[in-house]
Image (cartoon, helix red, strand yellow):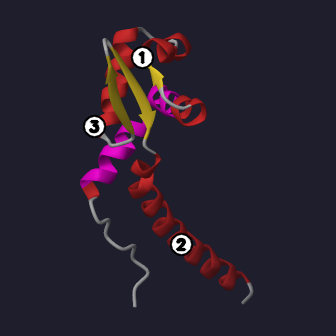
Amino acid sequence: MTNQPAPAAHPAAADALFKALSDGTRRALLEALVRDGEQNVQTLTRSAGVSQPMVSRHLAKLRQAGLVTARRAGRETHYAARVKGLGPVVQWMAVHGALWSQRFAALEGLGGR
């Protein structure tokens, strides 16, 4: 039996998630949606520190990665966090966290010799 991580069920999905989460502004937007619930673009722009077109682009990337949903209401679009979208990242972290724990335990075992 090897200590290799199990292959990701959908590696492209995990790649898209990590890419989407690699940007600080996108992480801040997602955090705001998780913390404060559904919001429209104007509300998100006020606290984002970037222009409305940039907020819209960041939200589009988050939506493509499956991290947010969009709902049209008249001329406004309301965004909400899709926490289940983090599933592939959580799975990746669990697999790799267990692998690192095994490796650290093996190193500690070597120190007692």
* Residue at 50% in and 73% down: 99
Q: Position of residue 40 (x, y in %)?
A: 44, 19
Q: Which mark is residue 41?
A: 1
Determine whether, in the image, residue 12 is placed left or right of residue 46: left
Q: Amino acid at mark 2?
A: Ala
Distance from Cα at disc 3 to Cα at disc 1: 16 Å
* Residue at 50% in and 66% down: 94
Earlier sequence position, callout 2 versus callout 3: 3
Q: Amino acid at mark 3?
A: Gln
Magenta run includes residue 38: no
Q: Which residue is mark 3?
A: 64
Q: Position of residue 32 (x, y in %)?
A: 55, 29
* Residue at 44% in and 63% down: 91
Labels 2 & 3 near each other (Cβ < 8 A): no
Determine whether, in the image, residue 42 is placed left or right of residue 59: right
Q: Residue furthest front?
A: 74
For disc 1, the neighbor class at 10 Å (few under 14, some 14 to 19, many from 20) is some
Report the front residue among 41 and 72.
72
Q: Position of residue 112 (x, y in %)?
A: 74, 86
Magenta segment, principal secondary structure? helix
Distance from Cα at disc 2 to Cα at disc 3: 29 Å
* Residue at 29% in and 51% down: 13
Region of the chain picked out in magenta, as a range: 12-30
Q: Which residue is mark 2?
A: 98
Q: Residue furthest right?
A: 112
Distance from Cα at disc 2 to Cα at disc 1: 39 Å
Q: Amino acid at mark 1?
A: Val
